[in-house]
Amino acid sequence: MIVSTKGRYALRVMVYLAQQPPGAYIPLKQVAEAEEISQKYLEAIMTILSKAGMVEAVHGKGGGYRLNRPPEGYTVGSILKLTEGSLAPVSCTAEGPAACSRSDCCPALPMWEKLDRMIDGFFESVTIRDLLTGT
């Protein structure tokens, strides 16, 4: 599994927003400059985060983005699953059309499923607050 720039940037943005004064709306341009992310690319990421209810957006003068819950209310897993679609280490454990047609007879499948649960458990155990405090 390789986390794309979209997932990594989304995490950076969420940490940046968590570092801002509570309730403050931070303009997209400010976030882009601070995190050295293309404003156009960041717009796409913020749209995803906003539509999923991860951030609150206000358009126009004085607008911007802010977290809509405390940093401990966001898991790294939820952000990465939103931006990456899946954290499955192999297609065998992916749901939907990418799932393996040989899953009923594959002796390695239990191992892949265990790894999938370990990855998910790890990322779901880490919050934005943890990233802020280094714990």
Image (cartoon, rainbow, N blue to C red):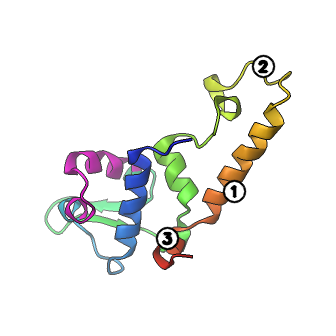
Q: Does residue 91 lie above or below 19 as drawn? A: above
Relative horizontal placement of residue 133, taking residue 125 as reference (left or right): left
Q: Residue at x 35, y 69 (%)?
A: 17
For image coordinates 38% across by 61% down, the residue present is 12
Residue picked out by circle 3: 131
User: What residue would you read off at disc 1?
Assistant: 121
Callout 1 amino acid = Gly
Say which quadrant the N terminus sits in.
top right
Cα separation between marks 2 and 1: 25 Å
Q: Which residues are magenta?
A: 31-48
Q: State which tag comes first along the sequence, 1 or 3.
A: 1
Structural distance between the alpha carbons of marks 1 and 3: 16 Å
Q: Are marks 2 and 1 in contact (CB under 8 Å)?
A: no
Instruction: Tell me: 30 left or right of 8.
Output: left
Quadrant holding the C terminus: bottom right
Magenta segment, principal secondary structure?
helix
State the residue position of label 2.
102
Confirm or deny contact between disc 1 and disc 3 (CB under 8 A). Answer: no
Q: Position of residue 64 (x, y in %)?
A: 24, 64
Q: Of callouts 2 and 1, which one flags the residue occurring earlier in the amino acid sequence?
A: 2
Disc 3 is placed on an element classified as helix
